[in-house]
Every structure is written in structure tokens, then in C-alpha cells.
Image: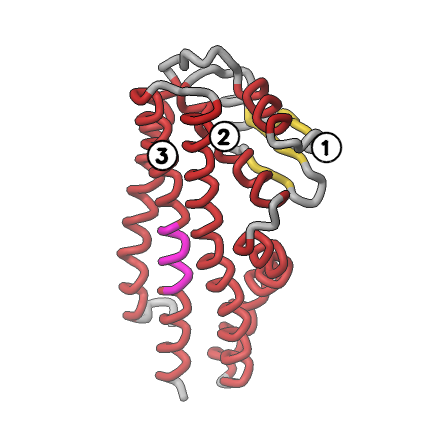
Amino acid sequence: MFYDPTFVLLIPALLLALWAQIMVQSRFSEYSRVRSRIGMTGSELARFILDAAGLYDVRIEYVPGTLTDHYDPIHKVVRLSQATYNSDSIAALGVVAHEIGHAIQHATKYAPIVIRNAIAPIAQFSSNLAWVFFIIGIITGALGLAKFGILLFIAVVLFSIITLPVEFDASRRAVKILERNLMMPKEELKGVKAVLSAAAMTYVAATLMSIMQLLRMVLIARSRD
């Protein structure tokens, strides 16, 4: 099983994931060295956009690490990494605006993010147990268990798919805010788009990987049926 030829299905997703990660690091590093003429740090930009959108109850917190930025919809907190919190670079402001985009999605009940947040607990549960049931089922010949593992993994795939419009929309909102609300120059917006498009490809790669894994599970189960 561990040397099953269906493993080749994962190669395109692995290559895409590697390429996307290299591009994210490269573009973020490049535009982290270019200061924006907006004159705000990441945390200042976050507070400005949140207040402009009437989201006074959303807090901003510092978290260690690089590109660990994220929006927590449960606690209504935008957490900014050490690479963006006090930085006024083009890369940092683009990432911050993207996370604020998620906060605005949440506040306006943007349909895909509502669906994603609803199925997130199910997807997390399924990701932890899907392979356990699947592998036990294949090893013992209990194909019912293996098929149950496949059903659990479908939730993981659905979560990955619904994440795509959420991430792409947050980036679109980020560019729109920086362009219209803060009048960011076009050459700076080009850098923001470069960083965010590279980041978006990591989600595309993750989705492709989950789909290929699901297909692989189905093929392996059928070969033992």
C-alpha cells in the first residue's frame, strides 16, 4: 500500500505546492524591502481600515513568527506577525489588508466564509480520523471502515474548495481598499498583487492535493474490493 502506484497522482500537487511556497517567500522578501508611501505600519493600517468599516470591536494583536497573520472570527481578533505588525513595507501592508478583508467578510456575512466557518470543526475532526479509519480498513480488509474514512475525507476536500473563494475575495477586497481608500500608487499595488497572488496559489495547491488524495483513496479501496 505504501508503495502504491497511485502515489504519482500527488506529484503535480506537490510540485505546485513547492513552487507556490518558493514564490510566496521570494515575493514577500522582495517587497518587504520596499517601503510604502502610505506612511502607516501594518498595525496602524489595520486599525484605520477596521475603524473606517465600523468594526470598532475587532481587536489587533501581535503574534510571533513570519506570515503567521490571521483573522480569528470567534474572538474577533486580527493577529499580525512580527513581519507585518510594525512594518510599513508594501508586502506587509498587502498581507494586513488581506486579513482585514476576512474581518469584513465575517462582519458582512459573506456566504463562502459563513459556510467555511460552519464546516471547519467537521473538517478538522475528519482530517484527524479519515486516514486512521482508511488505513485500518485497508490493512484488515474491512472495506466498510476504509469507505467511512473516504467519507470523512470528503469533508476535508469540501473545506479546501470553499476556502478558495474566501481567500481570493479577501485579496480582492485588500487591493480595492488600498487603491480606493488609501490611494496607494499603482506601482505599489503591483507589488501587493504579486504577494497576494503567490499566497493564493498555496491554497490552490492545498486544494489540488486534497482532491488527489481523495482520488487516490478511492482507487486504493476499489483495488481491494
User: How far across and down, in percent of the image, does residue 115 sit?
Assistant: 57, 59
C-alpha span from label 1 to label 3: 31 Å
Name the side, left or right, on which 173 lies relative to 5: right
Q: What amino acid is labelled 1 in the image?
A: Asp
| Residue 134 drawn in magenta | no
Q: What amino acid is labelled 2 in the image?
A: Ala
Residue at position x 41%, y 80% from top? 221
C-alpha span from label 3 to label 2: 16 Å
Q: Secondary structure at mark 3?
A: helix
Which residue is under mark 1?
57
Q: What amino acid is labelled 3 in the image?
A: Val
C-alpha span from label 1 to label 2: 17 Å
User: How far across and down, in percent of the image, does residue 190 sit?
Assistant: 31, 27
Q: Secondary structure at mark 2?
A: helix
Q: Which mark is residue 97?
A: 2
Q: Which mark is residue 104?
A: none
Of residues 148 and 190, the one nearer the viewer is 190
User: Range of the magenta residues?
Assistant: 204-211
Which residue is under mark 3?
24
Of residues 203 and 55, the one nearer the viewer is 55
Colouring of the image? secondary structure
Residue at position x 68%, y 33% from top? 58
Outermost residue toward the front in this view: 180
Name the side, left or right, on which 186 lies relative to 32: left
